[in-house]
Amino acid sequence: MAGVATIAAMGAGARGTGERQGASPAAADRELAARLMAGESDALAEAYRQYAGLVFGVCRRVLHNKTLAEDVTQEVFVVLWQHPDRFDPARGTLRTWLGMLAYRRSVDRVREEDRRTQRETRSDRSAPVASEVDDRLTATWLSSRVRDALDLLPAEQREAVMLAYYGDRTYRQVAVELAIPEGTAKSRVRQALSKLDRLLRSELTEEDAPAWT
Amino acid sequence: MDLSTDQLLRIAFDAAAADHADLPEGLAERVLAGALAGAKPLRHPEWADPEGAELSPLSAFIQTAAELADLIETLAPQDWARMTRLDETTVRDVVAHLVGVERYVLGQLGRRPDVRAPRREDHWPMTTRAAAELADEPPEAVARRWWLEVLDVVAACGELGPDHQVTYHHLAGNLRGLLVVRTFELWTHGDDIRQATDQSLNLLDDARLSLMVNELMRVLPLGLALSGCPQAGRTARLNLTGPGGGTFDVALAPDETPADPDVTLTAHAIDLCRLASNRLAHEDFDVLIEGDGFLLEPILAGATAFAAD
């Protein structure tokens, strides 16, 4: 009823009996953002359940300090609650947006701590203040480091993790495609992620990245 | 297999987070309390979804908007120039029209300058200004603009609550009804785009179709009056099948109580919704008639009395 021009109050609603068709991941991200926009606190709790592990993990990796990581995790979810419209689903998933937000906020916090330490110790007034997050820390740069790190994985692990992330496949689907048991698929993906974590830390250290390590 | 930037970043973040699966005790409470302590208004409590499979109109609108946005995002650049089943209207025109509709609604809610559109016939013309403003924008900017307007509508509706009074063109009502109508509208325009781009139409789910069918049944007597053919003292029973279906006894004139039915119509609920949105011609409406067949045309005219484009 496009443009139907009636909005009188609804009567008693009919009882629903069916299940809603599953939304695509992109539509689910949009739904969550819209529910946050509407001020639905349950949506914030849902976002926390889905993404707190990721956000806290990234913060902890960058900051190496549990208390600071908790602070930044809180900041990230406050941003999500206050400004869900800043998330642009056309540019990527909510998961990645929150990961980048956690990453950038953590890097900023590292630099704040560095500046504070420098001021307090007055050890080197001539030391340059760290610049703002530079281009190397953009999504493009970071993704290129991931691509390089993937190339360093054993072929069977690389294949499993790429299959899993390329099409959001389940462990079961990865197992079917690779003709291996599901447990083996899960193990390969986990081993790959663990190795990637170490590789990315190392890579970023060699690049003299200001944080992450 | 070439992974996208987004997929690569997900790998990086998942890798970084893998060793920190256990969240500190009390962090959830701290995070939620910290966020909710801000000045942002909470959703009006009466928007909560009912128990079971039912949806609130706000949730139905959000789901339908998210699906439509997802559809728009997947369009190829050339799809935007395709003609829809609406007269001389491209896919791009439909999306730009929706930008104008959201702005009109925001105006009615006091969140934007008022857009004067007191008649049903104003529905499409009132959006030409928004379409003109977006004429030189790339498709992705038009899509983003529409989504941001939707979010503003959602924020306003969430705060104001379902019983907030609002006027939509020439009819007054509340936000509960408005969001059912807007769900109807987004679903219909989504199907306009799907049809133009050779995609399957959206069959919707039981919860949203139920909301729409219930609203349609409630306003049908008014629709008969608006179409100039009220049937005083007559009642129709509509047996609507499929998702959103049910049996409804409807008086065929305003302010009357349904009595024993003079006619029983059996049809698919989704077909009736498509007819009501002017996307299914009366002659193509597949219906079984028992009783006084003369009443069919007035009922169909009443059902389509609210379609504005």
Image: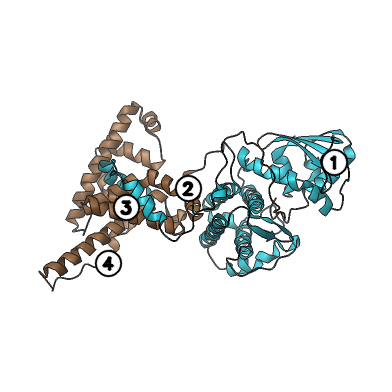
Chain colours: A brown, B cyan
The answer to whether mark 2 and mark 4 are in CB contact below 8 A is no
Residue A38 visible in the snapshot: yes
Q: Is residue A61 left or right of residue A84?
A: left
Q: CA distance from mark 4 to mark 3?
A: 20 Å
Task: Determine crowd level at label 2: few under 14, some 14-19, many 20+ residues with C-alpha closer than 10 A.
Answer: many
Q: Which residue is mark 2?
A: A26
Q: CA distance from mark 3 to mark 2?
A: 23 Å
Residue B4 visible in the snapshot: no
Q: Which residue is mark 4?
A: A132
User: Quick one: SS at disc 1?
Assistant: helix
Between A209 and A55, the one lying in front of the other is A55
Amino acid found under the numbered disc labelled 1 = Leu
| B147 over A190 or under it: above or below | below
Q: Which residue is mark 1?
A: B296
Q: Chain of mark 4?
A: A
Between A11 and B148, the one lying in front of the other is A11
Residue for point 30% across, 48% down = A56
Q: Which callout, 3 or 2, points at the residue further toward the start of the chain?
A: 2
Discs 1, 2: same chain: no
The answer to whether mark 1 and mark 3 are in CB contact below 8 A is no
Q: Is residue B286 left or right of residue A93?
A: right
Residue B256 lies in what quarter of the image?
Answer: top right
Q: Is residue A58 left or right of residue B221?
A: left
Residue for point 50% across, 43% down = A24
Discs 4, 3: same chain: yes
Quadrant that contains the N terminus of chain B: top left
Q: CA distance from mark 2 to mark 4?
A: 31 Å
User: Quick one: SS at disc 4?
Assistant: loop
Q: Which residue is mark 3?
A: A73
Disc 1 versus disc 3: nearer the observer: 3
Amino acid found under the numbered disc labelled 3 = Thr
Disc 4 versus disc 3: nearer the observer: 3
